[in-house]
Image (cartoon, rainbow, N blue to C red):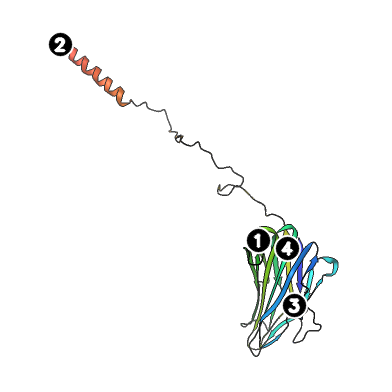
Amino acid sequence: MRKLLLAGAAGLLSIASAHALPTSLTVDGLSFSNITCAVPTSSGNTAGDCSGLNAVQAPGGNGLEIQGALLAQAPPTSQLDVLISYQLASATPISNIGLGFNATVNPPGGSSSSSMIEQVFTGPGGTLLGTGSVNTPSDLTSQLTLSTPETSIYAMKDIRLTAFDAQSVDLSTIDQTYTSGTPPTTGTPGTGTPGSTPPSSTPGSPPTISTPGSPTPVLEPASLALLGAGLAGLGLARRKRS
């Protein structure tokens, strides 16, 4: 399993250091390119934008860290929406993507929320391979299984924080894991039995029907006609003798 770890350092209304996301990066044999970031919505009392995010290789070389701070705090009603997209190339086909984040709402409860939706395509404007999402308060992890394993994918991630009343929503860690390989195939599709082979038939041959007990012979119409003619002749002969 190859792992992409997207991590943001928690903060309040300021960012300790500002950096820009790199446009490309290679980690553990995974090549990320065309990395883009945009903030289509930032209203009310929010902190964090693309200029405050930085991507570095994680300690130990086991993933990627995107460091930054994302926060929405009320009052007033506040919303922060961050879009991140990237192209990913892998030497082996990617079949599954694990998603996770640790967004929190403080104090708990209420109508404030955070969500992350990820869509994966074969390329920009290409075929949709799958959609996954995580959201507060309890669905913090999920699995996104691609419809077909691919060595090259294009991902679009939409991260949204919305704060109402006197609550705040912050996000400090986003996890993403990649599983390579082709999902196992069990059985023959449509047979209903794993591994079974559908029955074969010869075109034009009638079905064979077995009936319990001994079969009873049935005379054909031609045979019945001959039998009737014979009986009639026998009766006529008897009349002449009498």
Q: Quick one: SS at disc 3? A: loop
Pick whichever, 143 or 90, lies toward us: 90
Q: Earlier in the sequence, mark 2 or mark 1?
A: 1
Q: Amino acid at mark 2?
A: Lys
Q: Residues within 10 Å of mark 1 (few under 14, many from 20)?
A: some
Looking at the image, is mark 2 or mark 1 nearer the viewer? 1
Q: Residues within 10 Å of mark 3 (few under 14, many from 20)?
A: many
Q: Is residue 217 left or right of residue 199?
A: left
Residue drawn at 69 percent across, 61 percent down: 96
What x and y, as percent, mark residue 148? 65, 57
Relative height, residue 194 to residue 156 (above, below): above
Q: Are marks 3 and 2 in contact (CB under 8 Å)?
A: no
**Number of marks present in the image shown:** 4
Q: Which mark is on residue 172?
A: 3
Mark 2 vs mark 4, CA separation in Å? 105 Å
Tell me the residue that label 2 is attached to: 240
Where the C terminus falls, by quadrant? top left
Q: Residues within 10 Å of mark 2 (few under 14, many from 20)?
A: few
Tell me the residue that label 4 is attached to: 178
Mark 1 vs mark 3, CA separation in Å? 27 Å
Mark 1 vs mark 4, CA separation in Å? 11 Å
Outermost residue, right direction? 60
Q: Quick one: SS at disc 2? A: helix
Mark 2 vs mark 1, CA separation in Å? 96 Å
Tell me the residue that label 1 is attached to: 146
Q: Amino acid at mark 1?
A: Leu
Mark 3 vs mark 4, CA separation in Å? 20 Å
